[in-house]
Amino acid sequence: MEFPQATFLSSPSGSRADATAWELHHGYKRGRLVRIRHGVYLPAEQWLSVNGWERYALTTASLAIRGESPVFCRETGLLLWGVKLAGLPQAVEYLTSHRDQLGRAAPPRLYGNRDAVEKLGKQLVPDLSILPTGFRDAKRLGTSAGRWSVVSDRLGLRLRVQDLDGLLSDTIHRLPFRDAVVVLDQLLPKKPVAHEPAHQASVHHKPAAAYMRSVEHLAGLCSLLPKNAQRERMSAALTFADSRSESVGESLSRAVIAELGFEVPELQFRVMGPFGEVARTDFHWRQRKLVGEFDGRIKYTRARELSGKSIEQVVAEEKAREDRIRALGYSVVRWEWDELMQPGRLATKLLRAGVPRVPQNSYRPKRGLPAQI
């Protein structure tokens, strides 16, 4: 979870007495402040200037402003451990030992003056069409005595989080097949390593790679799940997971391709020419001599950051790379995030490219759960 720089404001009864209760209320009514939760505010420009993932991070962090944070669980906990998700959660999830507090809270009333905030938003983000919504709290039954925590040096906050094995056991089987694959692809080690539990009590934004789990360890967690349906769902995702996947987009693409009934491609295929490697592609269908590429915005942004080149140069070089691949007799099919979010469009593109379908009696996920081989 990435935390943007932010200035939280709270009432005098909180741990950060940055303003009087009247000043906070007045700023909220004037549209200068956004109320993230009761007694905790952010300047409206800070809330509007960041993306949805960062707003989710700020909403999570706001639970630590007025005292010790709760123990975060499920998707919120995974994000705090550094695990990326396929989609933005709609609720901040944490544990409570009080049964009468379980469930989702009402949506927060973020804006005291929507007109004023909308006017400011259009100045900051010219293409803003609607004000961003907030995130509910969702309380789950569990112990609140968590020893693990994530420290955000940028915000100066410590957020308590459930242990990773507990998170995986409680979360993986609840996720749709494709979302579970995205998580598990990240956790599998690039090369086999024995599982050794970490002994430090703070994560300090270490990547999930620092806490990878072997297939055997994850299978052990799966075997301990109390219900057969839970074990089947987690086992199906674990069987399909592949450590060679290098991004959320690649993992999600592979899972959606399988759910659509297409042959699952090879990953990280090296296209070889007469003088060595020409390119390494995301996907490869050997029967058709067809390579596939997922074009995520992050892919080009990261390439620009690493090379120091303009986005136009990066795109031109990618086009030249594709020409070299085609010159060796390969076909190329590309898709973007929008097509991945609309599987029907992706299916049409894959069919036109000649991606083979799998026979009915072969592996194919159904209703988010793969058929047994």
Image (cartoon, grey):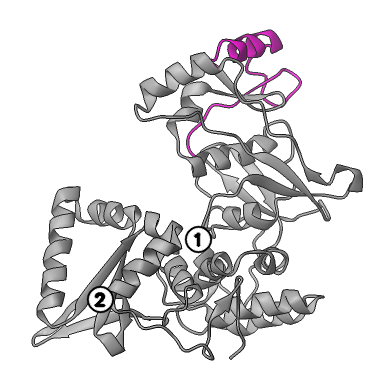
Residue segment shown in magenta: 4-32
Q: Is residue 139 above or below residue 163?
A: above
Q: Are marks 2 and 1 in contact (CB under 8 Å)?
A: no
- Secondary structure beneath label 2: strand
Is residue 8 found inside the magenta-colored segment of the image? Answer: yes
Identified at 50% across, 77% down, the residue is 189
Q: Which mark is residue 207?
A: 1
Location of residue 66 in the rendering, given as x and y in whole percent from the top left corner = 72, 30
Identified at 54% across, 68% down, the residue is 178
Question: Which quadrant of the view contains residue 234?
Answer: bottom right
Identified at 48% across, 38% down, the residue is 4
Magenta segment, prevailing SS (helix, strand or loop): loop
Q: Which mark is residue 344?
A: none
Q: The residue under label 1 is which amino acid type?
A: Pro
- Secondary structure beneath label 1: loop
Describe residue 134's horizontal placement relative to residue 141 as left or right. Answer: left
Question: Which quadrant of the view contains residue 127?
Answer: top left
Identified at 64% across, 14% down, the residue is 24
Q: Is residue 121 above or below residue 322?
A: above
Label 2, on which residue? 280
